[in-house]
Image (cartoon, helix red, strand yellow):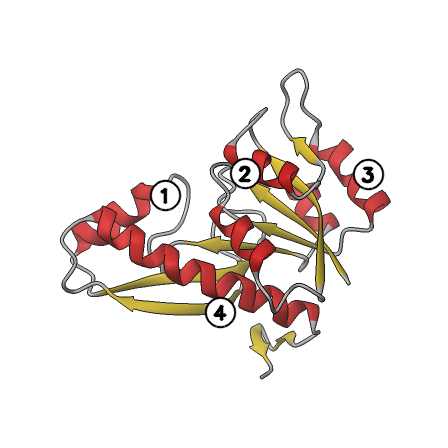
Amino acid sequence: MLAVSVFVSGRGSNLKALLESPELKNLIKITAVVGDKINCAAFDLARKFSIPVYSVGNKEGFVSFNELDKIFNELKIELIVLAGFLKLIPGDFVRSFRNRIINIHPALLPSFGGSGMYGMNVHRAVFESSAQVSGATVHFVDETYDTGKIIAQRCVDISELKSPEEIAEQVLKIEHQILPFVVEKIALGKIFVDNKRVRVES
Protein backbone atom coordinates (compact mmCIF):
# COMPACT_ATOMS: atom_id res chain seq x y z
CA MET A 1 0.00 0.00 0.00
CA LEU A 2 1.15 3.51 -0.82
CA ALA A 3 2.25 5.42 2.31
CA VAL A 4 0.68 8.88 2.15
CA SER A 5 0.86 12.06 4.21
CA VAL A 6 -1.86 14.70 3.91
CA PHE A 7 -1.14 18.38 4.65
CA VAL A 8 -4.09 20.43 5.95
CA SER A 9 -4.95 23.85 7.34
CA GLY A 10 -8.68 23.73 8.03
CA ARG A 11 -11.60 21.39 8.43
CA GLY A 12 -10.13 18.59 6.32
CA SER A 13 -12.96 17.86 3.88
CA ASN A 14 -10.51 16.61 1.24
CA LEU A 15 -8.77 14.47 3.87
CA LYS A 16 -12.19 13.02 4.66
CA ALA A 17 -12.78 12.34 0.94
CA LEU A 18 -9.52 10.39 0.77
CA LEU A 19 -10.21 8.44 3.96
CA GLU A 20 -13.73 7.50 2.82
CA SER A 21 -12.92 6.68 -0.82
CA PRO A 22 -13.77 3.01 -1.48
CA GLU A 23 -11.32 2.97 -4.41
CA LEU A 24 -8.42 3.93 -2.12
CA LYS A 25 -9.24 1.58 0.75
CA ASN A 26 -6.81 -1.14 -0.35
CA LEU A 27 -4.38 1.10 -2.23
CA ILE A 28 -3.12 3.70 0.25
CA LYS A 29 -2.48 4.16 3.93
CA ILE A 30 -2.49 7.70 5.34
CA THR A 31 0.26 7.46 7.93
CA ALA A 32 0.67 11.14 8.86
CA VAL A 33 -1.40 14.31 8.80
CA VAL A 34 0.49 17.61 8.89
CA GLY A 35 -0.89 21.07 9.61
CA ASP A 36 0.38 24.63 9.90
CA LYS A 37 -1.50 25.16 13.17
CA ILE A 38 -1.16 23.54 16.58
CA ASN A 39 -4.67 22.20 16.10
CA CYS A 40 -7.47 22.28 13.53
CA ALA A 41 -10.63 20.34 12.72
CA ALA A 42 -8.69 18.13 10.30
CA PHE A 43 -6.48 16.98 13.19
CA ASP A 44 -9.59 15.86 15.08
CA LEU A 45 -10.60 13.84 12.03
CA ALA A 46 -7.13 12.28 11.78
CA ARG A 47 -7.20 11.28 15.45
CA LYS A 48 -10.53 9.50 14.91
CA PHE A 49 -8.67 7.31 12.41
CA SER A 50 -5.66 6.95 14.77
CA ILE A 51 -3.40 8.84 12.35
CA PRO A 52 -0.43 10.69 13.91
CA VAL A 53 -0.55 14.47 13.49
CA TYR A 54 2.31 16.96 13.22
CA SER A 55 2.33 20.76 13.32
CA VAL A 56 5.01 22.16 11.04
CA GLY A 57 6.53 25.60 11.48
CA ASN A 58 8.94 27.67 13.54
CA LYS A 59 6.87 28.02 16.71
CA GLU A 60 7.24 26.17 20.00
CA GLY A 61 5.63 22.74 19.83
CA PHE A 62 6.03 22.59 16.04
CA VAL A 63 8.45 20.51 13.99
CA SER A 64 10.62 22.10 11.31
CA PHE A 65 10.52 20.96 7.69
CA ASN A 66 14.01 19.50 8.18
CA GLU A 67 12.72 17.42 11.08
CA LEU A 68 9.64 16.47 9.06
CA ASP A 69 11.87 15.27 6.21
CA LYS A 70 13.59 12.87 8.62
CA ILE A 71 10.26 11.71 10.07
CA PHE A 72 8.90 11.04 6.59
CA ASN A 73 11.97 9.03 5.65
CA GLU A 74 11.47 6.90 8.76
CA LEU A 75 7.77 6.47 7.89
CA LYS A 76 8.72 5.72 4.26
CA ILE A 77 6.24 8.30 2.97
CA GLU A 78 5.83 7.87 -0.79
CA LEU A 79 3.28 10.60 -1.56
CA ILE A 80 2.44 13.96 0.02
CA VAL A 81 -0.99 15.45 -0.67
CA LEU A 82 -1.58 19.14 0.00
CA ALA A 83 -5.31 19.32 0.74
CA GLY A 84 -6.02 22.91 1.65
CA PHE A 85 -2.54 23.55 3.07
CA LEU A 86 -1.91 27.30 2.87
CA LYS A 87 1.83 27.68 3.43
CA LEU A 88 4.55 27.61 0.77
CA ILE A 89 6.60 24.42 1.05
CA PRO A 90 10.35 25.19 1.37
CA GLY A 91 12.41 24.45 -1.72
CA ASP A 92 14.70 21.94 -0.01
CA PHE A 93 11.70 19.90 1.13
CA VAL A 94 10.15 20.02 -2.36
CA ARG A 95 13.41 18.83 -3.91
CA SER A 96 13.64 16.01 -1.37
CA PHE A 97 10.22 14.76 -2.53
CA ARG A 98 10.36 15.83 -6.20
CA ASN A 99 7.27 14.63 -8.14
CA ARG A 100 5.94 13.08 -4.94
CA ILE A 101 4.01 16.14 -3.71
CA ILE A 102 0.65 17.06 -5.23
CA ASN A 103 -1.76 19.90 -4.48
CA ILE A 104 -5.48 20.45 -5.02
CA HIS A 105 -6.33 23.99 -6.15
CA PRO A 106 -9.93 25.29 -6.26
CA ALA A 107 -9.76 26.80 -9.77
CA LEU A 108 -8.58 25.99 -13.26
CA LEU A 109 -4.87 26.74 -13.25
CA PRO A 110 -2.90 28.55 -14.56
CA SER A 111 -5.68 31.11 -14.02
CA PHE A 112 -6.51 32.24 -10.48
CA GLY A 113 -3.37 30.87 -8.85
CA GLY A 114 -0.39 32.24 -6.99
CA SER A 115 0.32 33.82 -3.62
CA GLY A 116 -2.83 34.75 -1.73
CA MET A 117 -5.08 32.77 -4.06
CA TYR A 118 -6.73 30.30 -1.71
CA GLY A 119 -10.19 29.64 -0.34
CA MET A 120 -12.75 32.37 -0.91
CA ASN A 121 -10.09 34.66 -2.39
CA VAL A 122 -10.03 32.35 -5.41
CA HIS A 123 -13.79 32.04 -5.76
CA ARG A 124 -14.27 35.80 -5.38
CA ALA A 125 -11.71 36.45 -8.13
CA VAL A 126 -13.41 33.89 -10.39
CA PHE A 127 -16.84 35.42 -9.72
CA GLU A 128 -15.68 39.00 -10.31
CA SER A 129 -13.93 38.03 -13.55
CA SER A 130 -17.29 36.84 -14.94
CA ALA A 131 -15.74 33.49 -15.86
CA GLN A 132 -18.39 31.05 -17.03
CA VAL A 133 -16.66 27.90 -15.80
CA SER A 134 -14.52 27.05 -12.81
CA GLY A 135 -13.33 23.79 -11.37
CA ALA A 136 -10.46 22.11 -9.59
CA THR A 137 -6.86 21.34 -10.54
CA VAL A 138 -4.50 18.73 -9.13
CA HIS A 139 -0.86 19.47 -9.90
CA PHE A 140 2.64 18.54 -8.86
CA VAL A 141 4.19 20.95 -6.38
CA ASP A 142 7.33 22.89 -7.24
CA GLU A 143 9.13 25.74 -5.48
CA THR A 144 6.48 28.41 -6.15
CA TYR A 145 2.73 28.67 -5.65
CA ASP A 146 0.55 26.80 -8.16
CA THR A 147 3.08 26.52 -11.00
CA GLY A 148 3.84 22.79 -10.99
CA LYS A 149 2.81 20.49 -13.84
CA ILE A 150 -0.95 19.95 -14.06
CA ILE A 151 -2.03 16.34 -13.56
CA ALA A 152 -5.82 16.60 -13.89
CA GLN A 153 -8.61 19.16 -14.06
CA ARG A 154 -12.38 19.04 -13.88
CA CYS A 155 -14.78 21.82 -14.77
CA VAL A 156 -18.11 23.00 -13.45
CA ASP A 157 -20.54 25.40 -15.15
CA ILE A 158 -20.91 28.51 -12.97
CA SER A 159 -22.74 30.70 -15.48
CA GLU A 160 -25.94 30.69 -13.42
CA LEU A 161 -24.35 31.02 -9.98
CA LYS A 162 -24.98 34.19 -8.01
CA SER A 163 -22.09 34.45 -5.55
CA PRO A 164 -18.55 33.31 -4.73
CA GLU A 165 -20.06 31.13 -2.00
CA GLU A 166 -22.16 29.25 -4.56
CA ILE A 167 -19.04 28.72 -6.68
CA ALA A 168 -17.14 27.43 -3.66
CA GLU A 169 -19.88 24.90 -2.93
CA GLN A 170 -19.88 23.52 -6.46
CA VAL A 171 -16.08 23.44 -6.79
CA LEU A 172 -15.71 21.59 -3.49
CA LYS A 173 -17.84 18.76 -4.88
CA ILE A 174 -15.44 18.52 -7.82
CA GLU A 175 -12.43 18.55 -5.47
CA HIS A 176 -13.81 15.56 -3.58
CA GLN A 177 -13.99 13.64 -6.88
CA ILE A 178 -10.74 14.60 -8.58
CA LEU A 179 -8.34 14.29 -5.64
CA PRO A 180 -9.13 10.62 -4.84
CA PHE A 181 -9.04 9.92 -8.60
CA VAL A 182 -5.49 11.28 -8.94
CA VAL A 183 -4.26 9.57 -5.76
CA GLU A 184 -5.68 6.29 -7.06
CA LYS A 185 -3.86 6.73 -10.39
CA ILE A 186 -0.59 7.46 -8.58
CA ALA A 187 -1.04 4.40 -6.35
CA LEU A 188 -1.61 2.28 -9.45
CA GLY A 189 1.48 3.69 -11.19
CA LYS A 190 -0.56 5.24 -13.99
CA ILE A 191 0.80 8.80 -13.97
CA PHE A 192 3.87 9.69 -16.03
CA VAL A 193 5.74 12.85 -17.01
CA ASP A 194 6.63 12.74 -20.74
CA ASN A 195 8.07 15.63 -22.76
CA LYS A 196 7.12 18.19 -20.10
CA ARG A 197 3.51 16.97 -20.03
CA VAL A 198 1.79 14.72 -17.50
CA ARG A 199 0.12 11.63 -18.89
CA VAL A 200 -2.59 9.77 -16.99
CA GLU A 201 -3.29 6.24 -18.17
CA SER A 202 -6.81 4.88 -18.08
Few, some or many residues within 10 Å of mark 2 (<14, 14–19, 20+): many
Going from the N terminus, do you reach mark 3 or mark 1 first? 3
Residues tagged 3 and 2 counted as in contact (Cβ below 8 A): no
**Mark 3 crowd level (few <14, some 14–19, many ≥20, 10 Å Cα):** few
Closer to us: 144 or 23: 23
Amino acid carrying label 2: it is: Ala
Q: Residue at x 39, y 62 (%)?
A: 174
- Seen at 52% across and 61% down, the residue is 179
At a point 47% along the width and 39% down the height, the residue shown is 11
- Between tags 4 and 2, which lies in front? 2
User: Looking at the image, is mark 1 or mark 2 nearer the viewer?
Assistant: 2
Q: Which amino acid does label 1 sit on?
A: Gly
Q: Mark 3 points at which residue?
A: 70
Of the numbered discs 4 and 2, the one sitting upstream in the chain is 2
Counting other residues with Cα less than 10 Å from the Cα at mark 4, is it few (<14), some (14-19), or many (20 or more)?
some
Q: How far apart are marks 1 and 2 (CA)?
A: 16 Å
Cα separation, mark 3 vs mark 1, equals 30 Å
80 lies left or right of 197: right
Residue of label 1? 119
Looking at the rendered structure, the secondary structure element under dot 1 is: helix
- Position of residue 34 measured from the top left corner of the image (x, y, whole percent): 63, 38
In this view, the mark in front (3 or 1): 1
Residue 110 visible in the picture: no
Rendered image: mark on residue 152: 4
Q: Are marks 4 and 2 in contact (CB under 8 Å)?
A: no
Q: How crowded is mark 1: few (under 14 residues within 10 Å), some or many (20 or more)?
A: some
- Using the image, tell me which numbered label, if any, was put on residue 42: 2
Closer mark to the observer between disc 3 and disc 2: 2
**Residue 184 x, y percent position in the rendering:** 62, 68
Front residue of 29/95: it is: 29
Residues at marks 3 and 1 touching, judged by CB atoms closer than 8 Å? no
Contact? badges 3 and 4 (CB < 8 Å): no
